[in-house]
Image: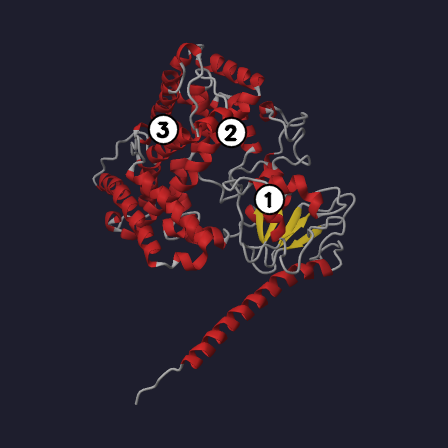
Amino acid sequence: MEHNITPRLLSWGLVVTIATIVIRFIHKAYVHRARVRSLRSKGIVSQPSILILADTIKPIATHSLIYGHIGIFVGFRRAHPPDVNINVFHIWFAKNYQKYFPGLQKLPPVVYLDLWPVGPSFALVYDAVAVSQFTQTKSLPKLHELTDYIKPLTSGLDIVSTEGALWKTWRSHFNPGFGPRNITALVPELIEDVSVFTNELRRHCGKGGTWGPVFQLREKAADLTFDVICRATLGMRSSQQSNQENSSLQAALLDQIRLMNLSTNGGLLRSQLPWHKAMISKNNRVMHNIIMPFIETKLSALHSNTNGAGAAKTAIDLAIQHAHSEGRKKSIKSDAEFAAMLISNIKAFLFAGEDTTATTICFLFKRLQDSPSCLARLRDEHDRVLGPAPESAAATLSANPHLLYNLPYTLGVIKETLRLHPLASTARQAPSGFTLTLPQSTTTDATHFPLDGFAPWVAAAGLQQSPEYWPRPTEFLPERWMESEGEPLYPRKDAWVPFSTGPRNCIGMELALAQLKLVCVLVARSFDIEEAWAEWDEKQ
C-alpha cells in the first residue's frame, strides 16, 4: 500500500517545527532576562555570608527585558572600527559606565552583562582580588565558547582547551621548553630572526637619514613572530620574513583562523556546511604534513640517543624528553595520540602568539614615538649595558644572553605597553553556586557576587588602568616598574594581567618578553619609527 503525504500535512509539520523553535527561543530569552531581574529583585543588600549584592555597588546596568544589555555592546561597536580588539571593550565601558549606571560615581568591581543571544552572559571583573578567586584560589575551566572556537584548529587537544589531569600532564610537559632557562639558551637563535626583522626595516628606510615610504609595521612584526614561534617550538626555520608570500604553514593557519571566525559569526549552520568542513580538514592536513616530520625526527633522535647534549632545545624537544622521563618508554615513537597532542599544541602556540606579540610591537613603538624622553632613556640603557655601538648589540647578546635580563628599563617599557594595551584576557566557566567575594572594608561588609549563568571575564584593560590600583593610570611611565615597595608608583603586581594569572596563565610569556626585548635592543637605537596615517590613506 502506498502512503501519500499531503501538502497540507507537510504544512502543518512545518508550522509545528517553527512554533517549537519560537517557543524554545522565547523560553530561553525569558530565562536569561529573568536571571538578571532576579538579581535586582533581591534588594541588593550587603550582609556577611549571604549571596546577594551591595546596594552601594549596583553591578547591574540599565537592562531591557527584550534586548538585555545588547545595546551596550552595540554602542561599543558603533564607536570603533570593525576589527577592534574585543578587549578594548573593557576600558571603553570603564570610561562610559555612567551612561549605563545613571548617578553612580564609581565603576562597580563586578558588572553583569546579559548578552544573549549574541553571546554568553558575562560578569566583567574589574577587581584584582575577585580575579584571583577564579584564576588562582580556584582555577575555573576555560569558557566553553572559547574552547569551541579553537576546536577546528586543535580538535580540543591543546592546553588551552583541556582540563583536569590531561591539562596538568601536558602543561608540565611544555613548561621546561617555555621556562626562562631554556628561553635564555635560545636567545642566540632568536637573534637571527630579529636581525632579519631589522634588515627588513632597513630596507624601508629613506636615503641619507630621510624618511622611507610608508608601510605596515604589523605585517613585518607578524612574520617575525611566526618565525620566532616556529624556531622556539619546532626548531623550524620558516623564513617567513624572507618570503614574498605566506609559507604553506602560515597560509593554512591564517585560512583556518578565517574559517573559525566565519563559524563564530555564521553560527552552527555555517560550521556544519560540507564545504566548510572540507576546507577545515584540508588546512589541518596541510599543517599536519608540515609539522609531523619535525616531530618524527625528534622522536627518532630520542630513540637513538642522538639528541645533542648541551644544545639549545626547542619546546617540542623538551616536551618529548619530559614525557619520556615520566615513564612513556613504551614505544613513544609509535604513539599516534601523543603526536596528535604535540601537533595540536604547536598550532595553538602559533595561533595564540602571532597576533598578540606582533600587535604589541606596534603599540610599543607608538608609545615610544609619543614619549621621546622614554625613548632617550631606553637608548641610554642599551648604550650602558650593551656598549655604544648598536651594530654590535646582536653579537654581544649572542655571546652573553644573560644580559637580556639586565635591562630593567627596557622591561619596564614592555610591561607598561602591555598594561595600557592588553590584547587578551581570560574568561571562565563558573559552576553552579560559585560566588565572587569582595572582602570587608571599613565602610562595607563582605560583598558576594553570585555567578550562576554568568561567565567571569577578566576586564584586563579596565583593571590595568584603574585608579584604584595605579597612580597616574593613563600615563606611560616605564619607571613605575623600577620602583621599590612603598614608593609612590610601585605597581600592584596582581593588577597586571596581560598574560592572565594563576596556573593557567600564558605559557608563552617568557618567549614573548624575550622577543620584545630583542626587538627593543636591535631596533630602538638604529631606527626612528613614526606612524603616518595621512601618507597611508593617500597610498590607499
Q: Nearer the viewer, mark 3 or mark 2?
A: 2
Say above or below: 215 vs 314: above
**Residue type, numbered disc 2:** Phe
The tag earlier along the polypeptide, 2 or 1, is 1
Say above or below: 147 vs 242: below
Whole-number angstrom distance, CA of label 3 to CA of label 2: 25 Å
Using residue 153 as the reference point, say whether residue 264 is left or right of it: right
The tag earlier along the polypeptide, 3 or 2, is 3
**Residue 96, which numbered label?**
none
Q: Residue at x 42, y 78 (%)?
A: 10
Between residues 138 and 514, which one lies in front from this camera angle? 514
In the picture of the structure, the residue carrying the numbered disc 3 is 186
Residue lying farthest to the left in this orientation: 304
Say above or below: 282 vs 371: below
User: Image quadrant for the N terminus?
Assistant: bottom left
Q: Would residue 346 be seen by someone viewing this image from the given angle?
A: no
**Residue type, numbered disc 3:** Leu
In the picture of the structure, the residue carrying the numbered disc 2 is 363
Whole-number angstrom distance, CA of label 1 to CA of label 3: 42 Å
In the picture of the structure, the residue carrying the numbered disc 1 is 76
Q: Residue at x 36, y 16 (%)?
A: 395
